[in-house]
Amino acid sequence: MTAEVTWRDYSLVGSETRKAEELGLASAQWYHCPIPRKRLKELMQRSDSPAIRDTITWFAAFFVTGGLAWYFWPSWWSLPFFLAYGVLYGSSTDSRWHECGHRTAFRTAWMNDVVYQIACFMIMRNPAAWRWSHTRHHTDTIIVGRDPEIALMRPTMILKVIGMFFAIPQTIESTRKMLVYASGRIPDEEQTFIPEMERPKAVLVARIWLAIHLAVIALALATHSILPMLFVGPLPTMYGAWVHVMTGLTQHGGLAEDVLDHRLNSRTVYMNPVLRFLYWNMNYHIEHHMFPMVPYHALPTLHEEMKPYCPPASRSVFAAYCEIIPAIIRQIRDPAYVIERTLPEGVKPLVPAAVPAE
């Protein structure tokens, strides 16, 4: 006989939410590597220069790939340029909204805000809602019933995971939420983390975005060409999503839920310079979660400081998936299975698993 598979409630208003609160996992204290305070303050220093350099390069890449895609349209020569443009539009924006949402990419506040708004539109994440969603993700990382950003729920739904590489479930959900917000409503789950004073912003942004999307569709109809929709809107978000999904699933895929130690539920992966540019060093993910106010350009240095206390980094994206794929396949029938992290000798986790609060 096969064991019955237990489905967990990943909603933010269900039984797992109450359980997390009862176990003391909600807004709990997390392990931090003992980095000297003075050194940490040095690493937390913000600077405009790296982000300005990278953002100029980023915008230039948009103009070059987009310009060449438009120039060669409708011939097949346009395809590689659309593929590159799509990766910029649907993947590199994942790290830009993230870092600028933390307000650590630039030292100058308005620069963070401008790039944040642009990136959020491209990746279809409401900037008002996702700023608070991500705050909760950092407060309660991979705590079931509390974290609204758990990508790989258990038991694993393989078809959904495959669809994620084309942003199919993400785009459907983003469009649904845009329409809900535009109607003036905030769903119950979002009300658990979006402050009441911020909710009108989510509604306003949704209505502006809806108008922009409808205008793009109208332009496509008026010109009898799909070209406008290939440059702006859900289509480039979808055809360019695969890189950010490939890198993003390495963050927590197959690792422990309901623990209070980022070394057990997050993963650092070494990546090549191109991926690190697109991903803005979020491959140093244990480091980012443990010290989220350290800017992206300082994460490689922080990684070296934290090495004595952390599991070995995955050598490459390929190496990471060599452990992720078998794990998520096993989690189809055994949702309780997790990849065990090996800490350096003499270093112990904060807690081996969730325990009831005293």
Image (tube, rainbow, N blue to C red):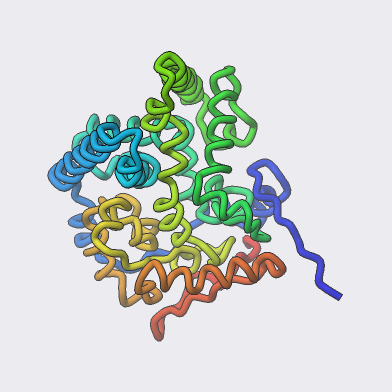
Q: Residue at x 50, y 21 (%)?
A: 203
Q: Is residue 98 visible?
A: no
Q: Please determine whether, in this image, residue 172 is positioned above or below residue 302.
A: above
Q: Please determine whether, in this image, residue 337 is positioned above or below residue 120.
A: below
Q: Quick check: 337 left or right of 89?
A: right
Q: Quick check: 281 left or right of 153?
A: left
Q: Quick check: 41 left or right of 93?
A: left
Residue 332 image offset from top left, x and y in percent = 68, 65
Question: Which quadrant of the figure contains the C terminus?
Answer: bottom right
Q: Residue at x 65, y 63 (%)?
A: 356
Q: Quick check: 27 left or right of 356?
A: left
Residue 63 image offset from top left, x and y in percent = 22, 35
Q: Residue at x 67, y 41 (%)?
A: 13
Q: Residue at x 49, y 68 (%)?
A: 264
Q: Compare residues 271 and 42 and report the one nearer the observer.
A: 271
Q: Compare residues 124 and 289 and report the one nearer the observer.
A: 124
Residue 21 image offset from top left, x and y in percent = 64, 51
Residue 290 image offset from top left, x and y in percent = 38, 59
